[in-house]
Amino acid sequence: MPDPVHPTAEDIQSLPESSRPSAPVRTDTFRKTRPEIVGPETPQQPFPVYLSGAVQRGFGRGGKDLGCPTANLPDESITPMSSVCEPGVYYGYGQVSTATNGDHKLPEEDVKVLPMVMSLGWNPFYKNERLTAEIHIMHDFTSDFYGHEMRALVLGHIRPELDYTSRGQEGLIEDIETDKRVALKSLARPDYQKFASDPHFLDHTSKL
């Protein structure tokens, strides 16, 4: 049975759409009380969570509407996350493969292991009908990387999924920028930094 306090994303997805709980609306109180660093000094269960999959085309609104381009993972690749975590925003590390089918090779700076933030849920502001995992790697990529394999290692939870009355600076965009800062500060701790060299990530050194 789902945990009535913190049901996983998979628990919620199994419910009829009409029975799914609504995400709370973001308030000024929430904004003013957000911590600078989240999570314990060492990742605790269920973290780390390992994810991988070919990057798919999403809605294309992360970069256009929010200044935060995201990569979507296939539905089947997010089960390790959705089965143990509630909807919300998470942080960790991500990496994109050098090439896809031997083509469209990315430069060295684009295939490093880099800090990331991840949204798991239905993005209630946009009223998504399908559970998605959207990852924003904190790096300015030289081009898109659709079809490339992405590997992600999720290390902690930043905040629950929220709904918004606007996407402007007073709401969604402001929280996204705060999420990035919180992720970077949280990952700066030694027991988190070491995961950037986890064997889960691809060794591109012989291919560059």
Image (cartoon, grey):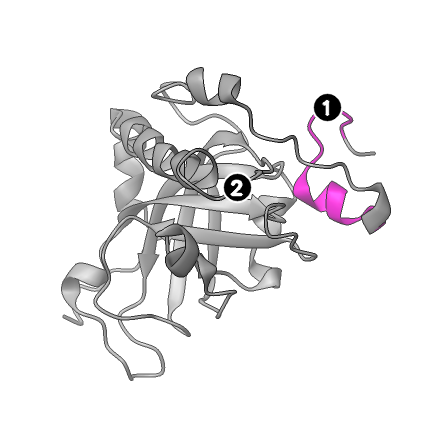
Q: Residues within 10 Å of mark 2 (few under 14, many from 20)?
A: few
Q: Residues within 10 Å of mark 1 (few under 14, many from 20)?
A: few
**Could you tell whether 4 is left or right of 184 in the image?**
right
Task: Estimate the x, y position of residue 55 in percent, counting from the top left.
Answer: 44, 67
Question: In percent of the image, x 18 and y 72: which residue is there?
Answer: 207
Q: Quadrant of the C terminus?
A: bottom left
Q: Nearer the viewer, mark 2 or mark 1?
A: 2
Asked if the magenta segment contains residue 7, the reply would be: yes
**Could you tell whether 176 is left or right of 205 in the image?**
right
- At label 2, the amino acid type is Ser
Question: In percent of the image, x 59 and y 46: which residue is there?
Answer: 125
Residue occupied by mark 2: 166
Give the quadrant of residue 103. Answer: bottom left
Q: Give the magenta range.
A: 3-16
**Above or below for 66 versus 97:** above
Q: CA distance from mark 2 to mark 1?
A: 27 Å
Residue occupied by mark 1: 5
Q: Quadrant of the N terminus?
A: top right
Secondary element at tag 2: loop
Question: Of label 2 and label 1, which has the lower sequence position?
Answer: 1
- At label 1, the amino acid type is Val
**Could you tell whether 127 is left or right of 97 in the image?**
right
The majority secondary structure of the magenta stretch comes to: loop
Question: In percent of the image, x 47 and y 48: which residue is there?
Answer: 50
